[in-house]
Image: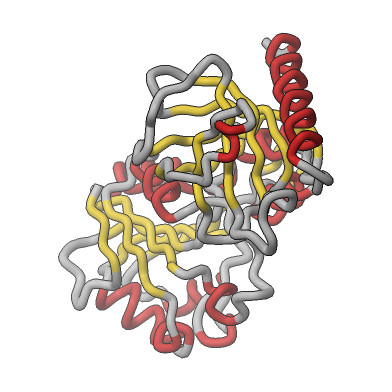
């Protein structure tokens, strides 16, 4: 797959394109990507995705923007797995935000990308002040065809990034997994920590986070990217017992594992929430709770096929 960071100056071929943020790449997004690949094959076009970084809502109001479900790398990996041959990551800035709908179609879709077929959701909005919608896009589509993706329902619920965030925030990981088609996961490179866990008898692998996560608490997890899939217990949050106004951190204690994996990229799958994050009066109390959390996670895995 060819990855383009920024819009090309001019198009170099015909694209079948879908446009969106694809945060989380849930089952609705996956249906769009599958339809994109199918149409591109039928029409002899290159299957491509146009997405944005940062998320437009982060650009307009960073503090009020919802927590991201997926990092850019995770989205790119998902695009690749669905047969996307070109991923265009456009920087969402004031210039892009100020384009009126006509200019977005003429300058971005036609001149720069060379689209011949476009797939969008029925609630698609584009252009300055989100003035463009599906009907306007169809009226302006003189050199390409437009298809609208139908709603994807999961157990009677519309698959959406908002629904996934709601499920994660409430600790309902099974619901989130149904909407995503897989367990919710976070990936990153293992970094050095304060080594407090090792001192307490529970050495952890640590993933510092650059953004506020969409969930927090203590979880039973499965980790991919090591010698084999590994089970463990994870703490995701600001560690109120040992840090003041700390940076969010994902700390994972793996069962029966004590290898040095600094720098390794791993993916942590969240399977079951054990409890909320809490502050403890001292390290002895924290240690007892970590031991209880590890026992609870082991019990979960023993009871879950």
In this rendering, position of residue 47 left or right of residue 297: left
Which residue shows up at 60% across the image and 24% down it? 232
Looking at the figure, which quarter contains the C terminus?
Answer: top right
Instruction: In the rendered view, tell whether residue 220 sits above or below residue 63.
Output: above
Instruction: In the rendered view, tell whether residue 144 sits above or below residue 82.
Output: below
**Most foreground residue, 289 or 86:** 289
In this rendering, position of residue 53 left or right of residue 115: right
In this rendering, position of residue 182 left or right of residue 189: right
Which residue shows up at 34% across the image and 41% down it? 263
Which residue shows up at 32% across the image and 72% down it? 143
In this rendering, position of residue 52 left or right of residue 158: left
Q: Quadrant of residue 86?
A: bottom left
Instruction: In the rendered view, tell whether residue 167 sits above or below residue 23.
Output: above
In the displayed orientation, state which residue is furthest to the right: 281
**Most foreground residue, 240 or 215:** 240
Residue 161, visible in the rendered structure: yes
């Amino acid at each position: 797959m060819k990855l383009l960071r920024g819009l090309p100056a001019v198009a170099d071929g015909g694209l079948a394109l879908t446009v969106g943020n694809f945060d989380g790449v849930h089952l609705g997004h996956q249906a769009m990507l599958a339809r994109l690949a199918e149409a591109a094959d039928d029409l002899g076009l290159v299957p491509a995705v146009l997405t944005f970084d940062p998320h437009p809502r982060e650009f307009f109001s960073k503090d009020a923007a919802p927590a991201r479900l997926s990092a850019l790398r995770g989205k790119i990996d998902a695009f690749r797995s669905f047969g996307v041959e070109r991923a265009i990551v456009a920087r969402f800035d004031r210039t892009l935000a100020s384009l009126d709908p006509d200019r977005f179609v003429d300058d971005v879709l036609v001149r720069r990308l060379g689209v011949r077929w476009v797939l969008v959701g029925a609630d698609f909005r584009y252009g300055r002040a989100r003035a463009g919608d599906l009907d306007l896009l169809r009226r302006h589509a003189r050199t390409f065809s437009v298809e609208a993706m139908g709603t994807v329902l999961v157990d009677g619920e519309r698959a959406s990034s908002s629904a996934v965030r709601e499920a994660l925030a409430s600790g309902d990981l099974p619901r989130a997994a149904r909407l995503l088609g897989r367990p919710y996961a976070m990936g990153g490179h293992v970094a050095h920590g304060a080594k407090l866990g090792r001192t307490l008898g529970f050495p952890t692998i640590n993933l510092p986070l650059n953004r506020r996560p969409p969930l927090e608490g203590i979880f039973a997890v499965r980790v991919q990217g090591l010698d084999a899939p590994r089970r463990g217990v994870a703490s995701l949050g600001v560690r109120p017992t040992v840090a003041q106004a700390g940076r969010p951190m994902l700390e994972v204690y793996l069962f029966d594992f004590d290898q040095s994996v600094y720098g390794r990229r791993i993916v942590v799958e969240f399977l079951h929430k054990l409890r909320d994050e809490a502050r403890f009066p001292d390290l002895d109390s924290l240690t007892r709770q970590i031991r209880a959390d590890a026992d609870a996670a082991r019990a979960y895995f023993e009871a879950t096929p």
